[in-house]
Image: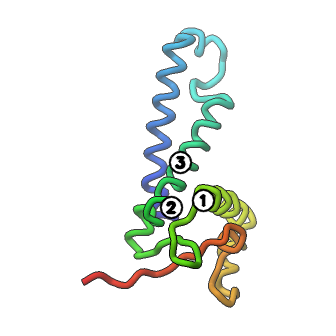
Amino acid sequence: MLYDSFLVIPVLGAVTGAGIAIRSAVIGSDTIRASGRAAVSGLPLQLTLALTIVLFFGWFWTRSGQTLGMQTWRLRVQQPSGDAITWRQALLRLGWACVSLLALGAGYWWALIDREGCTWHDRCSGTRVVLLPKQR
């Protein structure tokens, strides 16, 4: 998660910057200043940032099963059959990963006692994280 956050945070920053630029172009920077609200406030930007996160993880997980951070640690998320996960599974996995994190990480710690080493979001999405062999 730490490695992926090094990638996601700059992407979110770029999206936020684009959102500020678009909002300033549409309603004007004087109007933004006069409103007393921050240039980055509002539900549209929050939804755009959430969608950015979903697309970031969903795209990597459904394509190769690995984010760039997961590649570093030779981890791959996949179906129990070894196939790539679907968008439905990616959405379920991401949603339950948030629940796991909000529960003070309990969903992640669960892997330590689970007989198959699965987290809550693995169980709920029907996915598995596997360690890939070292390449020579």
**Which residue is labeled 1 in the image?**
90
Circle 2 residue: 61
Callout 3 crowding tier (Cα within 10 Å): few <14, some 14–19, many ≥20: some
* SS class, disc 3: helix
In the picture of the structure, the residue carrying the numbered disc 3 is 55
Q: Nearer the viewer, residue 11 or 38?
A: 11
Mark 1 or 3 closer to N-term?
3
Q: How is the image coloured?
A: rainbow
Are dots 2 and 3 in contact, CB under 8 Å?
no
Q: Are marks 2 and 1 in contact (CB under 8 Å)?
A: yes
How packed mark 2 is, by other alpha carbons closer than 10 Å (few <14, some 14-19, many 20 or more), is: many
Q: Is residue 49 above or below residue 74?
A: above
* Residue with the most extreme bottom position: 115
Residue drawn at 24 percent across, 84 percent down:
136
Instruction: For marks 1 and 3, give the CA distance.
Output: 10 Å
Q: Position of residue 32 (x, y in %)?
A: 59, 15
